[in-house]
Image (cartoon, grey):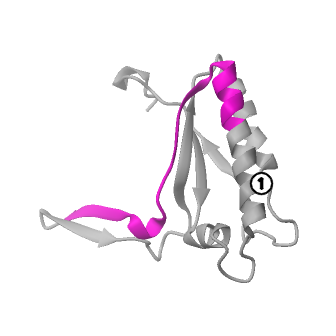
């Protein structure tokens, strides 16, 4: 699973908000890049699934306190970055999955609007059974 991380501020910037808000053309260039990246995976037969997630403001964290569920609305002050989307690929090797994820390092962004943080994605193997877990 290739996991794309972001913050509420990142999503606001993509939505054109704030001093460094992206223009519609800049967002379109990002969408074009991501569409090509996804289509390349479909054509290679490695694509399994991909989803974007709603902004952190729509998140709910559920925990237990004294045995009763407690629901906390997002975003969470202590959390700067959250999962904003993912792509699942089925590759011949872990190295190939890393190669696919590395292409995201070239995701276009407006050079005159620097990011507040370093852009990265995380990658982790998915397992089909508890026996596959390396604990």
What x and y, as percent, mark residue 127? 44, 26
Is 109 situated left or right of 82 in this image?
A: right
Of residues 63 and 52, the one nearer the viewer is 52
Of residues 24 and 93, the one nearer the viewer is 24
The residue sitting at 68% across, 22% down in the picture is 43
What x and y, as percent, mark residue 8? 55, 70
| Residue bearing the label numbered 1 | 29
**Residue 1 visible here:** no
**Direction bottom: furthest residue:** 19
Q: Which residues are magenta?
A: 37-64
The residue carrying pointer 1 sits among few (fewer than 14), some (14 to 19) or many (20 or more) residues within 10 Å by Cα, namely some
The residue sitting at 63% across, 19% down in the picture is 45
Q: Is residue 62 magenta?
A: yes
**Residue 18 visible here:** yes
Q: Is residue 129 above or below residue 37?
A: above
Q: What is the total number of numbered labels drawn onto the structure image?
A: 1
What x and y, as percent, mark residue 118? 74, 61
Is 67 situated left or right of 41 in this image?
A: left
SS at mark 1? Answer: helix
The residue sitting at 77% across, 62% down in the picture is 26
């Amino acid at each position: 699973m290739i996991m794309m991380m972001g913050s509420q501020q990142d999503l606001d910037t993509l939505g054109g908000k704030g001093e460094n808000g992206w223009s519609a053309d800049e967002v379109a260039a990002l969408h074009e890049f991501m569409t090509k990246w996804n289509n390349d995976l479909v054509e290679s037969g490695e694509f399994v699934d991909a989803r974007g997630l709603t902004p952190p403001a729509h998140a709910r964290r559920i925990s237990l306190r004294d045995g009763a569920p407690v629901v906390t609305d997002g975003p969470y002050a202590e959390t700067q970055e959250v999962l904003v989307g993912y792509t699942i690929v089925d590759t011949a090797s872990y190295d190939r999955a890393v190669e696919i994820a590395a292409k995201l390092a070239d995701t276009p962004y407006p050079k005159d609007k620097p990011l507040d943080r370093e852009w990265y994605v995380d990658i982790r193997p998915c397992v089909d059974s508890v026996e596959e877990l390396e604990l």
